[in-house]
């Protein structure tokens, strides 16, 4: 996805990283899972470039970042975003160190 101005072309991050790829070509009503959602930076990009996504499920285990994520989502996004204050992984109950807390 490109935006053109008189002096530059702004390319979405996914397109810059994966040129000519179907990885960033979401269909309407996609369900997005954002693991390690940080403070909402990925959600912001998804909504900007793919406004017709149906839902985004965002996981952020760091409590400080999670609070910022929730504040961002509650700030009036025109999107369906559910936030989870937990990590994702291959098994239930594993403990992971969170660098921001160390």
Image: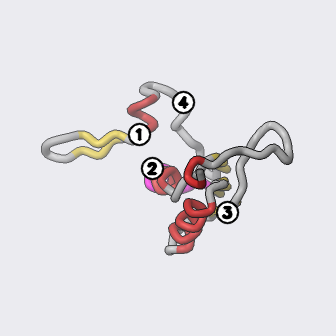
Image coordinates for residue 2, horizontal then vertical, percent: 33, 41
Instruction: Give me the residue at 65% from left, 57% from top.
Output: 55
Classified by dominant secondary structure, the portion drawn in magenta counts as loop
Task: Please report whichever mark, 4 or 2, sits nearer to the chain's N-terminal start.
Answer: 4
Q: CA distance from mark 2 to mark 1?
A: 10 Å
Q: Nearer the viewer, mark 3 or mark 4?
A: 3
- Residues marked 4 and 2 touching at CB (< 8 Å): no
Instruction: Give me the residue at 62% from left, 64% from top.
Output: 80
Q: Is residue 61 left or right of residue 48?
A: right
Q: Range of the magenta residues?
A: 48-53
Within-10-Å neighbours for mark 3: few <14, some 14–19, many 20+: few
Most extreme residue toward the front, as rendered?
102
State the residue in front, 30 or 74.
Answer: 74
Q: Which residue is mark 1?
A: 13
Image coordinates for residue 93, horizontal then vertical, percent: 85, 47
Count of numbered circles on the image: 4
Q: Indicate the secondary structure of the residue bearing disc 1.
A: helix
Q: Nearer the viewer, mark 3 or mark 2?
A: 3
Q: CA distance from mark 1 to mark 3?
A: 23 Å
Q: Nearer the viewer, mark 2 or mark 1?
A: 1
Image coordinates for residue 63, horizontal then vertical, percent: 62, 62
From where the camera sits, is residue 34 visible?
A: no
> Residue 76 lies in magenta, yes or no?
no
> Residue 49 lies in magenta, yes or no?
yes
Within-10-Å neighbours for mark 4: few <14, some 14–19, many 20+: few
Q: Is residue 2 left or right of residue 26?
A: left
Q: Which residue is mark 4?
A: 22
Q: Indicate the secondary structure of the residue bearing disc 3.
A: strand
Tell me the tag on residue 82. 3
Q: Indicate the secondary structure of the residue bearing disc 2.
A: helix
Q: Which residue is mark 2?
A: 49
């Amino acid at each position: 996805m490109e935006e053109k101005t008189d002096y530059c072309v702004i390319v979405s991050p996914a397109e810059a990283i994966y040129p000519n790829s179907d990885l960033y070509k979401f269909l309407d009503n996609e369900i997005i899972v954002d693991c390690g959602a940080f403070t909402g930076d990925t959600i912001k990009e998804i909504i900007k470039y793919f406004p017709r996504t149906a839902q985004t499920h965002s996981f952020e285990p760091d409590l400080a970042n999670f609070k910022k994520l929730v504040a961002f989502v509650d700030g009036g996004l025109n999107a369906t975003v559910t936030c989870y204050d937990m990590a994702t992984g291959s098994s239930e109950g594993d403990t992971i160190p969170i660098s921001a807390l160390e």
